[in-house]
Image: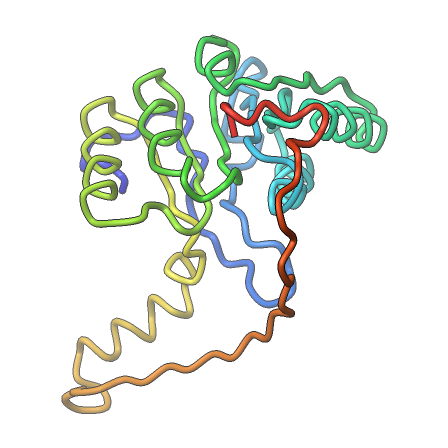
Amino acid sequence: MKPEKNIPRRQFVKHTALVGAALSLPTVIPAQAFGANDRINVAVLGVNGRGKNHIDGYMNLDNVKVTTLVDPDMIICEERAKEYGDKYNTRMKAVQDQRDVLDDKDIDVVSIASTNHWHALSTIWACQAGKDVYVEKPGSHNLWEGRKMVEAAAKYDRIVQHGVQLRSSRAIQEAVQLLRDGYIGDVYMARGLVFRWRDDIGDKGFESVPEGLDYDLW
């Protein structure tokens, strides 16, 4: 998704090589590469699932700080802001509407771990607002949405990385290059199979919107 242009100093997405059980998040350029005033401020969208891993991942990187958490469930958002604020001895702002983050000039990066149907539009909005983006899988629901994300990244000269971390692993890149170089001959077929059992949640019937959740924003 990265546009073919010169990348400014906030090229925070570089080599994502964390795999297996470890958290896979974009690697941020170390603090030594920046000046004293070049801290990267991150807003994490969606904090009741994968977003919790995003917070930990960013807060353990040099010269990067999660300053804002966003979730349509304000009760959850405020709980996470206190939980992680206490954990890292800092203050994290709790915001319910992601559009408030897009208007915040102090936010450099938007890290999207919200519900899947928001991924494409949040990415495009963030690019339009001048933010760089890390977006979880799935990036989009269809090719049209994906192309619009790529177009937005190019048009607004933003860095956008989709959470397919293995593609940024140097080992995987080297293996792919060997295939392209014909190291094992002509590859005509590849098969992949993954079984991940998920329990049936059953018939939950109709329930009211949980307290604190803005269903329109969700």
Please indicate whether residue 11 sits to the left or right of residue 144 in the image. Answer: right
Q: Nearer the viewer, residue 184 or 211?
A: 211
Residue placed farthest to the front in the image? 205
Residue placed farthest to the bottom in the image? 185
- Residue drawn at (65%, 53%) of the image: 204
Please indicate whether residue 9 sits to the left or right of residue 75 in the image. Answer: left
Q: Is residue 143 above or below residue 175?
A: above
Q: Quadrant of residue 95?
A: top right
Q: Is residue 161 above or below residue 123?
A: below
- Residue drawn at (55%, 64%) of the image: 19
Please indicate whether residue 144 sits to the left or right of residue 190 in the image. Answer: left
Q: Quadrant of residue 169?
A: bottom left
Residue 107 pos. (x, y %): 51, 17
The colour scheme is rainbow
Q: Nearer the viewer, residue 194 or 186?
A: 194
Residue 61 pos. (x, y %): 63, 38
Q: Is residue 5 above or below residue 156?
A: below
Number of marks? 0
Q: Is residue 82 above or below residue 180?
A: above
Residue 115 pos. (x, y %): 50, 41
Residue 80 pos. (x, y %): 75, 31
Q: Nearer the viewer, residue 214 or 24?
A: 214
- Residue drawn at (23%, 90%) of the image: 184
Q: Quadrant of residue 192?
A: bottom left
Please indicate whether residue 12 sits to the left or right of residue 71 in the image. Answer: left
Locate the N terminus by quadrant: top left
